[in-house]
Image (cartoon, coloured by chain):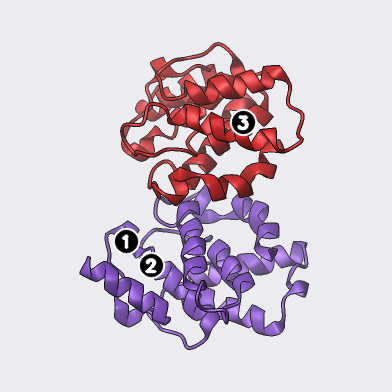
Chain colours: A purple, B red
Amino acid sequence: MIASLCVPYVLHESHTLNVLQSRLHGLDHWFRIWKNAQMLTGLDLHADLEVVALYALFHDSMRLNDGEDPGHGFRGYKLWERYNRLEDVKQYLTQNQIELLLEACTEHSSGFKSDDPTIAVCWDADRLDLYRKGIWPDPRLMSTQTGFDLTMNRVRS
Amino acid sequence: MIAEHYIREVLRESSTLNHLQSRVSGLDHWFRVWKNAQILAQSTSGVDMEVVAIFALFHDSMQVDEHDDPDHGMRGWFLWEYLYDGSGHIFSPNRDRLVAEACEDHSKGYTHPDPTIGVCWDADRLDLHRKGIWPDPRFMSTGAGRLLALGRVNPRV
């Protein structure tokens, strides 16, 4: 996957990992998003997993703090752009895939839902990991049917 | 580095990540152990960083309990052995012994005169503050580790 090519660069440059040393938004969170996304896409073949993997890697990579931090999603996308100035890996993506990654990263903490199946999986996979902060994900904010079903079950249990 | 070839398999097999979904002993911790080891190795001679990288990746990979799991280091080493046996990589018997000892005994509170094992354990202990514990300088194996632990306990030292 293209994301695996970017991993060494992100490990080296990520503000979240190297400066903030976040306990909430670091590698464990990115890994669980990827696992959640694979679970969500088990029944949905429309999501683009190349974009989802890039989202998992970049969306929280440039946090300055573990709170609100407006703009961190866009900074994560800018890190993707910076990497592409060194290694042109975006040549393997279509323009549509790049635009999906931009929207998924920049808007992921704005509390929106999405009709696009790829962005929906990105955001639902992210929200399904909210319980690390002691928050049950709100089913009304889930974009996919599978995400909605999962959060309903979690709320009930 | 040799450890890089095993990341994909460890992500797939690790009980710490996939079953326990640890908040304190997962990817973020492994990453910080590696970063700490790089700092320690700058002022410690004779450190085999290939062994240290394997330790960082495997030592906590097979935890089944966050608090009481005395054999997790051995299980981490078993995973290394299992993956290494089928890999075709050549690893000297001395390096294999270092990986085994570093993993098996890393949580037993020992110090070690070997610089490679010393850096592994000190790098691990320097991340104890994730659990709210300041590392104790008396349990550090390297001079650099002791100085860092002293500095963290009392910044005026």
The kind of secondary structure element at disc 1 is: helix
The residue that mark 3 highlights is B81
Residues at badges 2 and 1 in contact (C-beta under 8 Å)? yes
Q: CA distance from mark 2 to mark 1?
A: 7 Å
Residue name at image x 34 percent, y 76 percent: A149
Tell if the residue under mark 2 belongs to the same chain as the one under mark 1: yes
Q: Pinpoint the chain carrying mark 2.
A: A
The residue that mark 1 highlights is A131
Residues at badges 3 and 2 in contact (C-beta under 8 Å)? no
**In this rendering, position of residue B154 left or right of residue B93:** left
**In this rendering, position of residue A109 left or right of residue B103:** left
Amino acid type for the residue under numbered disc 3: Glu
Q: Pinpoint the chain carrying mark 1.
A: A
The location of residue A126, given as percent across then percent down, is 43, 68
Vertical placement of residue B13 versus B121, above or below: below
Vertical placement of residue B54 versus A141, above or below: above
Q: CA distance from mark 3 to mark 2?
A: 34 Å
The kind of secondary structure element at disc 2 is: loop
**Mark 1 packing: few (<14 Cα in 10 Å), some, or many (20+)?**
few
Amino acid type for the residue under numbered disc 1: Tyr
Front residue (pair A72, A145): A145
